[in-house]
């Protein structure tokens, strides 16, 4: 059995086999996995064989897919004219026949399988290995004023990248909603019950994370915790185990004792964690040992470098290294979703907003305007609002005031019961529990079974024509308390 298929069966995640499935076949139930709805709405079939190589196509006017398609030729580049596979969807006998495998497409997007054919623009000289080696060798010695000019040159042309969509890409989430509409039409229902995405009916989830990169960042952590606590918001601190600064037990305990969370941030932040598969195994062993020593359940790589195929060697419950859209990151791409998802045995909590460093130093934006725009887009999909704010870069009062304004904005959202502000570990624990819950009939009603079911809520997808909306029980989310 393909290891990705095996993992999908064990984890209930979205990772299918790479390549074709190889007349019609029943597909893995990605819709049930996403919505935790009844299996009777798993109505999709696709061809056993695909006649075309992988490429880009559309599923409706907005959602861009990457994979194989039997109804039209996928494009080599996302900027080409794209075939719309939705025009070849058929329904018969309560079943939906698709010209592609949505499990494959979702996997290709979330795991960034498309990225090698991304239409990004990067100056070739700055991509040379020798230049990168030199840069990371001297990076700790370079002041931010120098680094940001080098990074602007490296990221030149980012605004010309058409995919993933800036400033937020919800293509995967749009695909799921289109599948839900098709399933409801095939079953001729206008209301479909499912297990709501977040506990207690919360409309969205918010997490704040702090990657500690330098001794100055370590020194600023107590003041940062004071600032967070002034808004009754807890967060996580990602600690670099080796070379950057001494990691004292008292420092870790000062974070944990105040109710904040500790995670592991790479090994030594040299930018080469995934560069050599053989060396990665040795690094992974050391990273795992630090995870146990720190009592850390989560991991994030340096500079958001990522390789989904290597993550299985890391012994963590969740990872936070995949950006939604990576136009302003050295490794281009993006997972195109605002929801958590599984990469084999690890739960991915994607980074769904722009980091503080590029916001301040690449975009020269010392305001919360972009963050608020992204928050609004994520909330429309009821997704995960996640931030990376470095203690190293908000020591300056100008930057710190922007972060304080963000905390105020989030606290007001919480007060209006528009989001659940959680620690990353809490969000991950919930998503894992929800992934194991089942919606079961009880006479004419529905109930939820599984660990954590007391905090789960039954919501309804409501279909009116082609318009899909969600209904959550009134006043389901009552708690405005921290976490």
Image (cartoon, grey):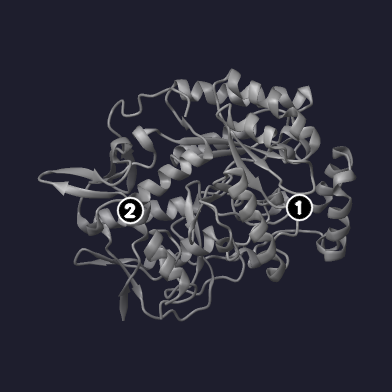
Q: Is residue 374 visible?
A: yes
In the picture as drawn, the residue positioned furthest to the left comes out as: 443
Q: Earlier in the sequence, mark 2 or mark 1?
A: 1
Q: Position of residue 350 (x, y in %)?
A: 55, 48
Identify the residue shown where x is 57% and y is 37%: 374
Residue matched to label 1: 157
Q: Is residue 66 above or below residue 393?
A: below
Q: Nearer the viewer, mark 2 or mark 1?
A: 2
Identify the residue shown where x is 49% and y is 34%: 422
Q: Position of residue 301 (x, y in %)?
A: 66, 52
> Which residue is nearer to you in this view: 364 or 90?
364
Identify the residue shown where x is 71% and y is 50%: 303
Q: Quadrant of the N terminus?
A: bottom left
Q: Tell me the tag on residue 302.
A: none
Horizontal arrangement in the rendering, residue 49 relative to residue 145 (left or right): left
Which quarter of the figure has residue 137?
Answer: bottom right
Q: Position of residue 115 (x, y in %)?
A: 63, 63
Measured in 3D between alpha carbons, the distance from the residue under mark 2 to the one under mark 1, in whole angstroms, is 37 Å
């Amino acid at each position: 059995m393909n290891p990705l298929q095996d993992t999908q069966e064990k984890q209930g995640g979205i990772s299918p086999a790479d390549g074709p499935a190889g007349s019609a076949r029943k597909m893995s139930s990605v819709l049930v996995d996403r919505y935790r709805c009844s299996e009777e709405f798993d109505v999709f079939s696709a061809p056993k064989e695909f006649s075309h190589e992988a490429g880009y196509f559309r599923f409706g006017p907005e959602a861009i897919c990457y994979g194989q398609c039997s109804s039209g030729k996928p494009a080599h580049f996302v900027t080409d004219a794209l075939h719309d596979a939705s025009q070849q969807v058929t329904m018969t006998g309560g079943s939906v026949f698709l010209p592609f495998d949505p499990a494959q497409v979702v996997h290709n997007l979330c795991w960034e399988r498309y990225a090698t054919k991304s239409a990004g623009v990067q100056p070739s000289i700055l991509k040379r290995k020798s230049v990168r080696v030199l840069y990371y060798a001297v990076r700790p010695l370079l002041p931010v004023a120098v680094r940001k000019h080098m990074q602007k040159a490296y990221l030149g042309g980012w605004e010309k990248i058409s995919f993933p969509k800036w400033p937020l890409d919800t293509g995967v989430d749009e695909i799921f909603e289109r599948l839900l509409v098709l399933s409801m039409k095939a079953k001729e229902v206008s209301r479909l019950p499912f297990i709501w995405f977040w506990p207690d009916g919360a409309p969205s989830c918010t997490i704040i994370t702090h990657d500690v990169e330098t001794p100055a960042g370590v020194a600023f952590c107590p003041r940062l915790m004071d600032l967070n606590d002034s808004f009754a918001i807890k967060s996580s601190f990602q600690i670099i185990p080796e070379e950057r600064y001494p990691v004292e037990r008292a420092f870790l305990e000062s974070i944990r004792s105040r109710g904040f969370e500790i995670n592991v941030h790479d090994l030594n932040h040299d930018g080469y964690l995934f560069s050599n598969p053989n060396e990665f195994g040795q690094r992974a062993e050391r990273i795992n040992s630090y995870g146990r020593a720190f009592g850390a359940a989560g991991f994030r790589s340096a500079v958001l470098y990522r390789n989904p195929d290597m993550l299985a060697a890391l012994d963590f419950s969740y990872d936070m290294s995949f950006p939604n859209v990576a136009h302003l990151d050295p490794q281009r791409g993006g997972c195109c979703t605002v929801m958590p998802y599984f990469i084999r045995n690890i739960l991915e909590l994607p980074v769904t907003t722009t980091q503080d460093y590029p916001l301040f130093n690449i975009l020269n934006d010392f305001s919360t305007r972009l963050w608020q725009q992204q928050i609004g887009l994520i909330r429309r999909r009821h997704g995960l609002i996640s931030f990376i704010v470095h203690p190293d870069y908000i020591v300056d009062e100008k930057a710190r005031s922007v972060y304080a304004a963000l905390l105020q904005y989030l606290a007001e959202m919480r007060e209006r019961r528009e989001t659940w502000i959680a620690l990353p570990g809490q969000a991950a624990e919930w998503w894992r529990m929800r992934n194991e819950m089942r919606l079961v009939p009880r006479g004419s009603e529905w109930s939820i079974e599984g660990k954590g079911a007391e905090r789960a809520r039954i919501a309804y997808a409501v279909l009116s024509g082609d318009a899909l909306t969600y209904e959550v029980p009134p006043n389901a989310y009552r708690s405005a308390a921290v976490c």
